Image (cartoon, coloured by chain):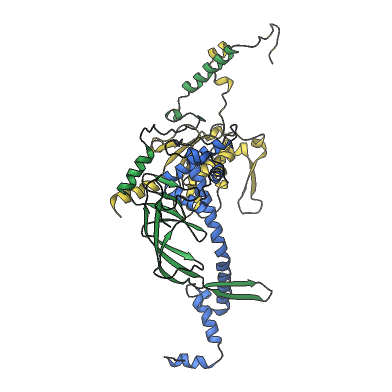
Chain colours: A green, B yellow, C blue
Amino acid sequence: MALIRAGLQRLANVFNGGQAGVLSRFVTSLSPVESKTVPETTKDVIAECNNLIEKNASRNFAIVHLLGKQWRVTDGDLLVVEGYWPPSIGDKIRLDKVLVAGTKDFSLIGRPLVQPGLVDVTATVISKGLSHTRTHFKKKRRKQFMRINFYRSPQTILRINSVEIANKINEAPKNVF
Amino acid sequence: MSAAKRVQQWATFARTWHIFDCKWQDPYESANVIKKYLMGLHKPIYHPMNDCGDVVVCINSREIALRGDEWRKRAYFHHTGYPGGATWTLAWELHNKDPTMIIKKAVYRAMKGNLQRRHTMERLLIYPGETVPEDVLQNVTNQIRQTRLVPTRLDQIPEEVSKAYPKVMDYPEDYILK
Amino acid sequence: MVFLTIANWVRSRGPDEFWRKRRMFRLAAHYIGRRRNCYSVTVRNVHRALVYATKARKLKKQDMIDLWSTRITAACEQHNITPCTLKQGLDRANIMLDRKSLSDLACWEPRTFECLAAVAKQKMEYDGAIDYTDKKYPTGVNLKLQDVMLEAWLKEKKQ
């Protein structure tokens, strides 16, 4: 058995080595997909992230849950929220349902939300109004059926003031509520 | 737009050249793979309106493998538009006439019929053998994985290797090989 | 009513045929040829366009969902994980991102998406949900989860 296996191996070597063609530059066919491994890190990741938070080096983004939808927001974004929503113009709002927050160097993934008070997304309601008129028109051919309706849905426009990581990771939350 | 941003934009939408070895591959199966690279479906920035498709170079299209007896059964239909102008060409006939045609038609049919399709096909280069023009080959930076293993034929094994290969049994002296 | 021109004043007295037709012509102002000039042709085309617009409001949502799925599939392929496994892994780990935000991350925040793929893979491994004979076994980036103290909560069962 060992003999046969050795023979097979020798055969395989012949084919792998012997096939010189166009593809000799490239990987051989059907070589296994390589599994990348991250280089060994010896540093304390959490401490490193906390350092970065303190330095506040880059712009942050966050995914917030708002009125049944998820939005990826960053500083200075405009959100158009459609449908009935009570806040009125000028209201300052903190969007608390943060699913993911991230910076250039690390991301905080919540399950499903990140720790309350850790990420601070503040927004201002800058306008409330109606969308453009949408025409709801139905028609059936040869059936003398035609209906037309018009509707406008309420729209609220939000300006994201800031997306900040307010607290250190793994620290007791400041009493925010 | 700053210079750095502009370069980033170019780099994002730059075309990558892929090579695909058709040897012993099912053209209809590999068409789905090639299509993905041609249309840019392998990039997370894909959008039907943005032009992020790549170039695919197919080599060895003469050595494709069709399933079962499809070489004899599969017919390619063409109509000249005149009465009696219909022709049905069998796959083996078509392959003899033009060894790149089967893979080309397979990729063409794998894509949805819209205005983009013909422009996308322009980015597919097919060569019947291993000879690829140098100016094409020097652009290639990636190889697409084949979908099937390429078997090795007995006549490709060097004789001394097959001689030295351990045998289970020998033929009897009086055995007549057909 | 105030009319600045005599012509409009004259028209306003009669039956509102003119205004009825004008409403249609206004909607067809950007059409070409007879489609914008002859009423009988215009009305057909405008009706058809309005029906399309009504139907397209639903179709657009569907199209967006398809596009997100395509993008997620493309990004998953880069990390050698199937969208199905990713979805299942994230769900088991109680990470509730929808397709919209996942595709957003895949497109604009690829490093975050990479982490999500690694988390999903790890969670599936801990749960033993991966069939090892399956060819689709994710072999993507191995995240050192011990460093970020995720191991404890990954091992925790979903409520």
Given residues B162 and B102, the one toward you in this image is: B162
Residue at 55 percent across and 14 percent down: it is A7
* Residue A98 location (% of width, % of height): 45, 53
Given residues C42 and C87, the one toward you in this image is: C87
Above-or-below relation of B20 to A59: above
Quadrant including the N terminus of chain B:
bottom left
Q: Is residue A151 visible?
A: yes
Residue at 36 percent across and 43 percent down: it is A49
Quadrant including the C terminus of chain B:
top right
Q: How many marks?
A: 0
* Residue B143 location (% of width, % of height): 46, 35
Q: Furthest-top residue in view?
A: B173
Please tell me in which quadrant of the rendered image residue B82 appears.
bottom right
Q: Furthest-front residue in view?
A: A175
Above-or-below relation of C158 to A79: above
Asked whether, in this view, residue C149 is left or right of residue B153, the answer is left
* Residue B139 location (% of width, % of height): 39, 38
* Residue A18 location (% of width, % of height): 47, 21
Above-or-below relation of C99 to B160: below
Q: Is residue C37 visible?
A: no
Given residues A10 and A119, the one toward you in this image is: A119
Please tell me in which quadrant of the rendered image residue C53 appears.
bottom right
